[in-house]
Image (tube, rainbow, N blue to C red):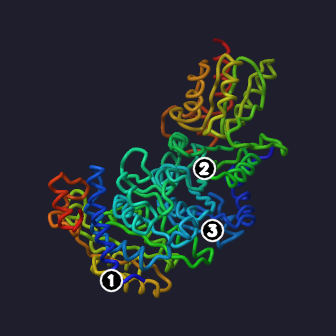
Amino acid sequence: MAKMATREAYGKALAKLIVEDEKIFVLDADLSKSTKTADAQAANPLRHFNMGIAESNMMGVAAGIATGGNTVFASSFAMFAAGRAFEIVRNSICYPKLNVKICATHAGITLGEDGASHQAIEDIALMRSIPNMTVIQPCDDIETTQAIRAVAKYKGPVYVRLGRSAVETVNSEDYVFEIGKGVVLRKGTKVAVVATGILVQEALKAADILKEEGVLVTVVNIHTIKPMDKNLLIDLAKTHDVLLTCEEHNVLGGLGSAVAEVVSQHHPVRISMLGIEDTFGESGTPAALMEKYGITYKHVLERIRKLLDK
Amino acid sequence: MLSKIQIEDIAKRVRINIVKMVNEAKSGHIGGSLSGVEILTTLYFNEMNINQDNIKDLERDKFVLSKGHATPLLFAVHAEKGFIPQEELMTFRKINSRLQGHPNMNYVDSVDMSTGSLGQGISAAVGMALSYKAKGLPYRVYSLLGDGETQEGIVWEAAMAAAHYKLDNLLAIVDLNGLQIDGDITKIMNPLPIDEKFKAFGWNVLTLNGHDIDALQQAYALARECKGRPTVIIALTVKGKGVSFMENDYGWHGVATNPEQFALAMKELGGE
């Protein structure tokens, strides 16, 4: 199976867009080689600006550029884009509803060896709580490429959550991405696994193992965490006994919470949440961290078995 | 170009409206609005290219009120320009009004950036100026900051970026009235010397009396002539300027007048 980090796909997609669309500006904060906006800089250095290690100002500058009718992509690590610059994102970008796409890389614990100080496990919660903000987390390179094109066309603030580590390509070449539409990847009964980001590949692995045992579970990729695909979730709630949400994010405030907000109000059904259990990460390889913090396919599988037993 | 007498006449009406708006709303920021009256009046009438014909343009000369609490000042000047109906000024800070406590760019065409959280306006102004440079557009960007506001770190991030990208189409003005909500700026958290700080970041710095109309207009012209770096005007002002009992009293940062105080202020300003 092909493997590519979503940040890599972002860099390639942006490098094309900056050439195609003269309204696109790109900002980075001294991490352009890591966030991959360096590709866009190489493609058109006249509309890529390095703002230095000053993420707050980068977001304010992004807002200012957007006031002129431009589309601005601003990148840094998720920790700094969503964390450090939160209030500027809130007041200078979301409140005036400016056309800024915050493409934050190195989200979650799979950032790896840099450790907890750099591992954003709160960014989905932060970003989705701001009015006017759209929150997207693509699960592979194909989805990322399409998502970046889609958000460039969409008018308004968007937070795109991208990862450092290579992820498996789960979508086919003819895949079509649409903001706000969840994707049903496997159809089953009783348990519906609702996953986002790197947990989509893990959920599929778990589902495939169960399939060999004759057990079919539903697997859904929720790439748009806000606005949530309400109709799909209500449909899943009506046709399954339990929903299992899976994410590389704190179980507080992330995908699980977003799903629960919809389901509990429209068609209450049991929900189980798999994610980072309200704890900081640490240094280690992405694989070792996923293992220790309980977000591999094995953990998804074990949780599904428990849910089926009850 | 309006004459000095015409500018003075507008400034007088702006002061009256500032006091009226805050009195009517029973809240708002009088002191820091009154200190910036000459700065903003000269800017809008004799410096910026902004009028009814280009007001809706996404790209034109822009002004960012980084000290976003000075909305009475901003809206009163916009009313003088005809951007906001005079009678609408009295809806300021009331429910369903376009005239929010801090400016919202989506409600009023003449508001070029939503501000209020200190330090962020100058950052957005840098973005505007940067995009004009990148696109080869001739427009200029102006931003008014408070002196206390320079305590925010983002101001200096923005200052560094503006000099780095040689934004000579950007003019920042610091309304140095010496007072912030809790008191004297030098006692709360001394940001002085502000001029030396901007110089160190690579800016062209001009210092003047912020109530001197001629000096302000000369400085705007000098800023236009300065190439290769942004300009900041350190405008020495009096908080509460024009109303004797408000002048240099930090207590008038964000409170409204009672009926007696309002009557006295109107009398001093020559209002009704």
Disc 3 residue crowd, few under 14, some 14–19, many 20+, Cα 10 Å: many
Q: Is residue A282 visible?
A: no
Q: Which residue is mark 3?
A: A48
**Residue for point 28% across, 75% down:** B193
Residue A269 left/right relative to B20: right
Q: Name the front one of labels 1 and 2.
A: 1
Of the residues shown, which amino acid type is indicated by label 2? Answer: Val
Which corner quadrant of the image does residue A217 belong to? Answer: top right
Q: Which mark is residue A158?
A: 2
**Marks 3/2: CA–CA distance:** 19 Å
Label 1 or label 3, whichever lies nearer to me, is 1
Give the chain letter at badge 2: A
Lower position in the chain sequence, tag 3 or tag 2: 3
Tell me which amino acid carries mark 1: Lys
| Marker disc for residue B4 | 1
In-front residue for pair B120/A162: B120
Residue B17 to residue A158: above or below: below
Q: Position of residue A122 (x, y in %)?
A: 51, 41
Q: Chain of mark 1?
A: B
In the image, is residue A240 above or below residue B58?
above
